Amino acid sequence: MTFATTQSRALAASVSIAVLALAAPVAAQDVAISSERLANLEEPLATEVGDITIEFTGLIDARVDYDFEEGVNNLVEGDDGINPGIIGNFEFNASTQLGNRWNVGVAYFGQYERDELSGGDYTDRVAGFVQSSYGTVLGGEVMDIVREETRRVRGIGNANLAFDDALGATRGWGGGYVGQFGPSRFSAVVDEHGQYDLGFVYQRPSGNAGYRYGVRFTDASFVAADGLTEFETNALMGTIEYLYSRSVYNVGAGAELMEAGPVNAERWFASAGWQRQWGAVTTSVEGHYGQIEGQPEKSAAFGLDYGFARGLSLNLGVNHRDGQVVVDGITILDENETTATGSLRFGF
């Protein structure tokens, strides 16, 4: 999907598309149950069976990843850093309207990913929903709803900006709510562990430009890079997005308090991005910087998309991440890599 289509939908859909990696809207609710990096922005195939409306979308992405560190450091051992693979996903949802005009339905999202290094892996999510004029109530694996509602719009192509979120995240099964009231949109989720995520977005056009503002609060947890220590976190984040002509500009910032027993750490971070369409080509540039107890975390991403036809595109991405943080002997972050990814993608 070209950026021109994204542009035309941005004011109405940028807060609800779980973009890149396979976003899945829940029927007509425009609520995503997946936050994968690959998103299919094509209109779904739809049909009616009796009183039930069935929608289906899918995507296939044949790709090649190159790890610069692996390629340079391990040539002697025969590892060239090249890792070909394929990702395929689909989303199925079915909905109907009751006599009281409530819409009820179920959505299922599945993704299969295979490459030479990690082999094959299948993941899926399922959710049910009830919608009325007061909003949409959802249940199931819906933990990414608030994140996708409030985040900065994702990078183009295979861009993937690291660290651009709170480290703590809700997880597993739970319930959520999304409500639209004029130009304002509220969202909330509570997971099976009692952790929660709250979001608010305000967006509307002004003259020839579009503006979008988002705020999010998260009470959640995460496991540190040592694989053992679990931190409880509270994070407050905000985003601002400006859309004009064929360009999108956005910034985001946040602060996070982390606690694991006697260990406490403070984190702050900021990210910014720019996207623009150049004919059939769309590009994006993003950057991120933050600190945990004075120790830096940095990332950058460049993405490119060339649309051949509806649903068919060539995608490139170069992504760098560097975060090596140790607090009181606990390794919180341990990442340092630069990768490039090229892929041929078809969505239907």
Image (cartoon, rainbow, N blue to C red):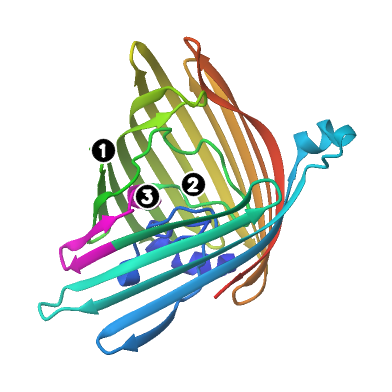
- The spot of residue 220 in percent (x, y) is 32, 34
Image position of 91 with respect to 195: above or below: below
Query: Which image quadrant for residue 26?
Result: bottom left
The mark nearer the N terminus, 3 or 2, is 3
Residue 25 visible in the snapshot? no
Per the rendering, the mark at residue 144 is: 3
Which mark is drawn over residue 160?
none
Tell me if mark 1 has few (under 14), some (14-19) or many (20+) residues whose alpha carbon lies within 10 angstroms of its own: few
Magenta stretch in the rendered image: 128-148
Tell me the element at label 2: strand
Residue that mark 2 sits on: 250
Q: Position of residue 80 (x, y in %)?
A: 83, 42
| Of callouts 2 and 1, the N-terminal one | 1
240 to 100, vertically: above or below:
above
- Considering the image in quadrants, where does the C terminus appear? bottom right
Residue 283 placement, left or right of 146: right
Q: Amino acid at mark 1?
A: His
**Residue at the (32%, 88%) spot, across then down:** 49
* Mark 2 to mark 1 CA distance (whole Å): 33 Å
For numbered disc 3, what is the local secondary structure?
Answer: loop
Q: CA distance from mark 3 to mark 2?
A: 20 Å
Q: Secondary structure at mark 1?
A: loop
Determine if residue 205 is in view. Answer: yes
Task: Point out the residue furthest to the right here.
Answer: 76
Q: Is residue 145 highlighted in magenta?
A: yes
Question: Which residue, given by chain and number where applicable, does mark 1 sit on?
Answer: 193
- Structural crowding at the residue carrying mark 2, measured as other residues with C-alpha within 10 Å and reported as few (<14), some (14–19) or many (≥20): many
Viewer-nearest of discs 1 and 3: 1
